[in-house]
Amino acid sequence: MVLIDSYGRPLLNLRVALTKRCNLRCQYCHREGEIFAENSTAEMSVEEIVRIVRIAVELGISKVKLTGGEPLMRKDIVEIVKGISAINGLKDLSMTTNGTLLAPLAEELCASGLKRVNINLPTLDEEVYRKLTGNRLDDVLEGVKAAVSAGFYPVKLNMLILKNVNEDAVSAMINFARETGTILQLIELEPINISETYYSNHYKSLDEYEKSLQQKALKVETRKFMQNRPIYHLPDVTVEVVHPTENTEFCMHCTRLRVTSDG
């Protein structure tokens, strides 16, 4: 059985926000659409989360991603991962994290059934990172290394491109991904829950990066069920490009269902 939405799209993936809490204050964060419920502290219990995922899997969902806020703020995160990973029929369990709390938890999370992680990393420059997020770049870099060492595969680095902030740091990030054995995702800024001024000041098209990647790539492919996202296989490193803005493919091929942190 596969769930079909009102636009005829199959629903194959479930994104579960575990919390609205976060230990960073990223300028551009849309918190999975929950920013306007900031005063609410209600969070689902482990049992509620596992029950929702189990029902979703019975209805055809095969992949689950845990998000936030920062999902590692949950003290019961290992219990959540164990409960979800034990569900028969689930093919993939992943997480998006800022990476600051990942290093001491990576091995236990991997052993508990978490298969892969996406780590938000907009820059390798400590001062730029502090201005964008608040601080703790060293913890994030340790989290990246720990994730790779623990056996997560793939480990992806989410680099949101911001004009006049980190637009010139892509080459350095590609080299870092190559050195660490991770995959780099270049992400276009979305006009969601940020001011028009911030968007106009910092939106940067990814077209010029794609032209460069096309010239260097040994192979180019697309992910059909990820909005036909282009994937560029460069020597010893892979780079994906995420175009959410003014991209009909982004919504047309969306297969995600979302659950907020309060259920």
Image (cartoon, rainbow, N blue to C red):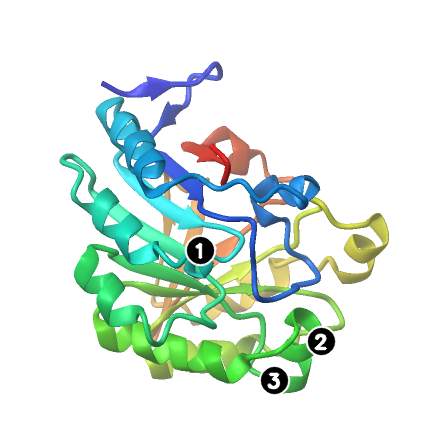
Which badge, 2 or 3, comes first in the chain's sequence? Answer: 3
| Foreground pick, 214 / 194 | 194
Few, some or many residues within 10 Å of mark 1 (<14, 14–19, 20+): many
**Please, what secondary structure does the residue beneath circle 2 have?**
helix
Q: Amino acid at mark 2?
A: Lys
**Which residue is pictured at 33% across the width and 19% down the height?**
3
The disc label shown at residue 125, or none: 3
**Please, what secondary structure does the residue beneath circle 1 have?**
helix
Which label sits in the foreground, 1 or 2?
1
How far across and how far down the image is residue 23, in percent?
Answer: 57, 66
How far across and how far down the image is residue 101, in percent?
Answer: 43, 71
Residue 254: in sight, yes or no? no
Which badge, 1 or 2, comes first in the chain's sequence? Answer: 1
Which badge, 3 or 1, comes first in the chain's sequence? Answer: 1
User: Residue furthest toward the right?
Assistant: 197
Picture quarter containing residue 16? Answer: top left
**Please, what secondary structure does the residue beneath circle 3 have?**
loop
Q: Which residue is mark 1?
A: 71
The disc label shown at residue 131, or none: 2
